[in-house]
Image (spheres, coloured by chain):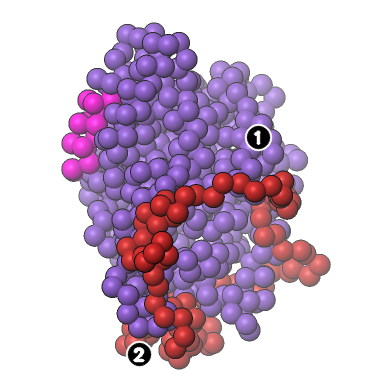
Chain colours: A purple, B red
Amino acid sequence: MDVKKFLEDAKSGSIDIVEHTSKVIEETKKIDRDYHYFNEISEELAMELAKRTQRSVKEGSAGIIAGLPVSLKDAICVKGVETRAGSAILAGYVPVFDSFVAQRIKEEGGIIIGKNSQDAFGFGSFSMNVGKGMKIPKNPIDPKRVAGGSSGGSAGIVAKAGFPIVSVAESTGGSIEAPASFCGVTGFCPTYGRVSRNGLISYANSLDKIGPMGKSVFEIALILEVISGHDPKDSTSAPIPAEKYTEYAGKGANGMKIGVIKEVFSEGTDENVTDSVWKVIKKLESEGVPYEEISLPTVMKYGISAYYTIAMAEASTNLARYCGMRYGAQDEISGSFNEYFSEIRTKYLNDEEKRRILIGTFVRMAGFRDAFYLKAAKVRTMIINEYKSAFRKFDFLLSPTMPQVAPTFEDAQKLTPLQSYMMDVMTVGPNLAGIPHMNMNAGAVHDLPAGFMLMADHFREGKLIQIGSFTEDVL
Amino acid sequence: MSELDTSLVKKVAKEARIKVSDEEAKRIMPAMEEIIRHFSILKSAETDGISPSFHPIDVRNALRDDKPETPIPQKDALSNVRFSKDGFIKGPRAVE
């Protein structure tokens, strides 16, 4: 049953929300045993929300997602549910407040069923950099392959579940798009500031964005409607009201023009992925959406370096707060603050967390700051300008999402850290520029999904939903 | 990238409050060096006269009204604390 039909039935009372939620929890547990999509299944909260929503249906005051199961990336705080952002250093942390998005989901009748597995703090493209003691999510189509990262659990459960479900994930440099591409689901990353970050455990403040994942563009639009809007508790939240994004679906694509980024179809991209994405472009053209090729030389040459420099610099300051005193992992206190804090951080952070902190600290240090961090911030301006210039000519840009389909765990393990960072070559650009972008499924390559990405100018989420909906209809 | 050596790795680690032995510094240095060398491509970008972007969109100071709000209760603030005394969080000694 699709989400639209489920919501109609739940609202009319023909689905018992409590009974349905109970079945969903059991099914989720079964899937999780084999695929590891959850760091925490919040059964108690889900049943409490189901009972509350069932009452609101009877009273005629149900919200727009009444009864719909929703999972959240582990980095998004939910009151009373252990929240670790995938890191062992946050073991045992139970928030005393709801994030903005968790609050909005509850207000609109959504049923929060748990916290999805992820790379620790979002540090990864494969969800293999999980915190010590946590399980790695597996690809829903082939469990010998990665689910993608860092929001691997979110994409995995959306793809695998037989029941209606949406996930709320987060992207810093591609953490929504990569797993959506590898798992064959729709993933949407909105404009920076469109969705409040209040209650999101930070990776890199100037890059973090919360966005939905679902099986269809309608589901994406619906959840975006719920979680968008201005929040005074996030100083970077845009003071622009949320739109009725679902109303953009089904409006056609009249007069729209696409720019195809030509550099991304290079020798580094699997030719089967290239073929799949070109079939989408040609299909759109045959349906009256013309395209032209465009070059984005600054994005392609400097994107990876600028992104990782800024992201690691910000991450190294954000993670300085984890010292084993106020929340998360805490050992018997001994020695001076320097000794104790260093002991805790050395013990509970994993190799990738340490690597990013060390490099992030390095690029901010006196003598290196101007050459790396400040230079990257200037290059970021050039990258934003390059996108702005492209959007003066085109409504949307299009590229593959990832250069290949999901690799096997064995192959992913062979990559050096830099080689795995290079997998993000197509996603870091839109994330640095903070523009909205969406992964959709371009088809299968040897039974594995290949994704393509549509991008639009800042705050053009509605138009992106419109072209996405049209594309979904014609493919 | 010739700037990175094991002593610099250890200095950075000390700043970041992460313990790194000489052996570990040697183990982690090649990957760090490879990454930082890749970052060095930024040096070739023509950025004269370009201002840095610390956010992707225009972000302005957002100040709320200067009125007191109710803080989280002490019980909640201590709910994740393993070691506390008399309503205070216990920490390691601050003076070496």
Residue at (52% x, 40% y) in the render: A100
Nearer the observer, A138 or A132: A132
Does residue A27 show up magenta in the picture?
yes
Residue A444 tag number: none
**Magenta-tinted stretch:** A21-34
Q: Position of residue A2 (x, y in %)?
A: 37, 20
Q: Position of residue A119 (x, y in %)?
A: 37, 56
Q: How many marks?
A: 2
Labels 1 and 2 share a subunit = no
Residue A66 to residue A178: above or below: above
Q: Position of residue A445 (x, y in %)?
A: 35, 40
- Kindly identify the amino acid type of the residue bearing the numbered disc 2: Asp
Q: In the visual, does A164 lie left or right of B44? A: left
Q: Which residue is mark 1?
A: A460
- Kindly identify the amino acid type of the residue bearing the numbered disc 1: Arg
> Few, some or many C-alpha atoms within 10 Å of disc 1 (few <14, some 14-19, many ≥20)?
some
Callout 2 secondary element: helix
Nearer the observer, A148 or A29: A29
Q: Which residue is mark 2?
A: B22
